[in-house]
Image (cartoon, rainbow, N blue to C red):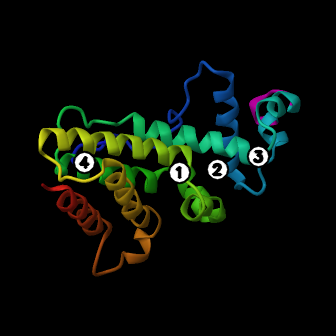
Amino acid sequence: MTSHRHNPSKPGAPAVGSSGDNPRDAYLDAARECILDVGWRRTTLTEVARRAGVSRMTIYRAWSDMPALLGDLMTREWGVLVASGVDLAGSPTPDAIADAMVATVDALRENELFTRIVELDPELILPYLLSRRGRSQELILEVLAGAVAAGQEAGTITDGDPQAVARGLVLAAHGFVLSAHTMVDDQVDQSALDDELHALVSRSLAP
């Protein structure tokens, strides 16, 4: 999560998630390209292998099916997006956590892989909203709960179970990630909604 006031370049550039050292990263890069080009439904392990320049068995040894590959791809994409910009060291304040949340929400909305999945294959997101938490959500919860606990110890954050507080914040953020566009029109723009999210988080965390 990054600062709302000092947001770095938008995620979704080729550098997101690519380490260049692990062969699996090259395979995930190939899968990412496939999904961006033709969508999830038309992406196969065979096509991923072709784009990666390896045999089908090489890909099948790494992932048994496309859902398993997609899980690793989304974990890498969103995990790097969150972890690369975490700046909540010291004694986090309500405003600092609100800055980080707004920036992360904005980064997710602008991420080209996330946008492509939502546009073409939104059903892929539903399990993480209705049935279970994903690995990336767990990472976000871990970061938030740690920041809340550190702020409580320093007296800058309101009392409460840090885990419960973090989960409440993530639930609130879901709507701003997935549904904000439905609330944007000539009367209210995206910036105004981001300001509302910032106020919601900051006020809920104030001692």
Residue drawn at x 50%, y 36% is 16
Pair 3/2: label in front: 3
- Are dots 2 and 1 in contact, CB under 8 Å? yes
Q: Which residue is mark 3?
A: 66
Which label's residue is closer to the chain start, 2 or 1? 2
Classify mark 3: helix, strand or loop: helix
Pair 3/1: label in front: 3
In the image: residue 207, left or right of residue 108: left
Q: What residue span does the magenta drawing correspond to?
A: 50-55
Which quarter of the figure is the N terminus placed in?
A: top left
Residue closer to the observer: 137 or 125: 137
Residue drawn at x 62%, y 41% is 73
Residue drawn at x 42%, y 67% is 175
- Whole-Å distance between the Cαs marked 4 and 1? 25 Å
Q: Which residue is mark 2?
A: 36
- Whole-Å distance between the Cαs marked 2 and 4? 32 Å
Q: Which residue is mark 4?
A: 97
- Whole-Å distance between the Cαs marked 3 and 1? 19 Å
Pair 4/1: label in front: 4
